[in-house]
Amino acid sequence: MPAESRDVEMVIAPPSGWGSIDFKELWVYRELFGFMVWRDVSVRYKQSVLGILWALLTPLITMAIFTIIFGRLAKIPTDGIPYPIFCYAGLLPWLFFSQSLQKATLSMVAERNLLTKIYFPRLIVPMAATLAPLVDLLIASSVLFAMMFYYQIAPTPHSLYLLPLCVLWAWVTAVGVGTWLSALNVYFRDVGQLIPFVIQVWLYGSPVVYPASLVPPDFQWLYALNPMAGVIEGFRWALFAHGDPPGSLVLLSVCVSAVLFVTGGLFFKRMERSFADVV
């Protein structure tokens, strides 16, 4: 039989053992990644009555409630920053993280039809799901700068470059935790039901409604094991540069985020071999 007439069959088999994250393969499928991000964004706003107002109402209403309860009634100190803007600056990275985490956790089950039909790097699914809330963050940020103008608080030019780094840090944390939970949610659907409760508890364990300075010094290192503590404190300091930079808090939180990102990716790769069979 002539060589040119022979059929070629390609077999795609799952790797055995603990596979590594193939970033080269993720880059090859970058167009699919971009399409999934764009699809999530367009679906969110296409048939919404209020449209982008949802991105403004969520942090504004939450900020108003927290200001009444924690600012007026509990009178929590804010290191000299007006409580509404203090709270809003903490809510922005937190809402981005919490929405990204929730979408990433549910993403694999939501894409079950796609997972069972074609091959592509499965890691694209939770990673793409974490980027759609970035649009809400950008829209809601306009209110933050309007509030700074109202309270006559000028941003600190020499530290503003840290803002996108803090957003990137929040995204890395969301991907790290999201890959863990999205893989587990394929096998245990209770994980998806548990996420709203986890996010609610995590909110009060992060310095959104209070400054991290209220935590006793002896427990600061333990508090820093929460990566969002460093993200939120770093985000606020990048805006206001009030007091000393949160050095040790940020350093330990960055290390925790890096560990979550790497181990989450490895765990996801280990579990993905049977996603199509279980999902």
Image (cartoon, rainbow, N blue to C red):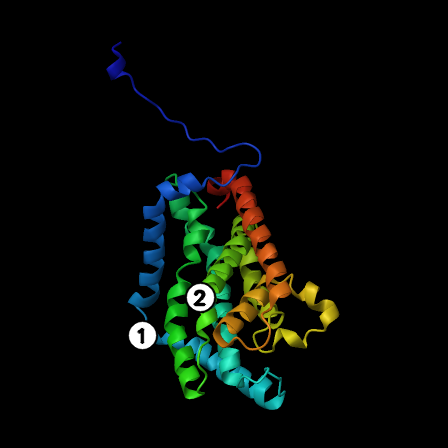
Q: Is residue 251 above or below residue 33?
A: below
* Three-letter amino acid code at the position of disc 1: Val
> Could you classify mark 2 by the number of other residues whose Cα lies within 10 Å: few (under 14), some (14-19), or many (20 or more)?
few
Instruction: From the image, tell me which residue sits under label 2.
Output: 161
Q: Nearer the viewer, residue 113 or 224?
A: 224
Nearer the observer, disc 2 or disc 1? 2
Write down the quadrant of residue 130 in the picture.
bottom left
Residue at x 49%, y 68% (from the top left corner) = 93
Is residue 243 visible in the rendered structure shown here?
yes
**Residue 249, position in %: x, y?**
63, 65
| Mark 2 / mark 1, whichever is N-terminal | 1
Instruction: From the image, tell me which residue sits under label 1.
Output: 49
Residue at x 46%, y 75% (from the top left corner) = 156
Write down the quadrant of residue 132 in the picture.
bottom left
Residue at x 43%, y 50% (from the top left corner) = 125
**Residue 131, position in %: x, y?**
41, 59
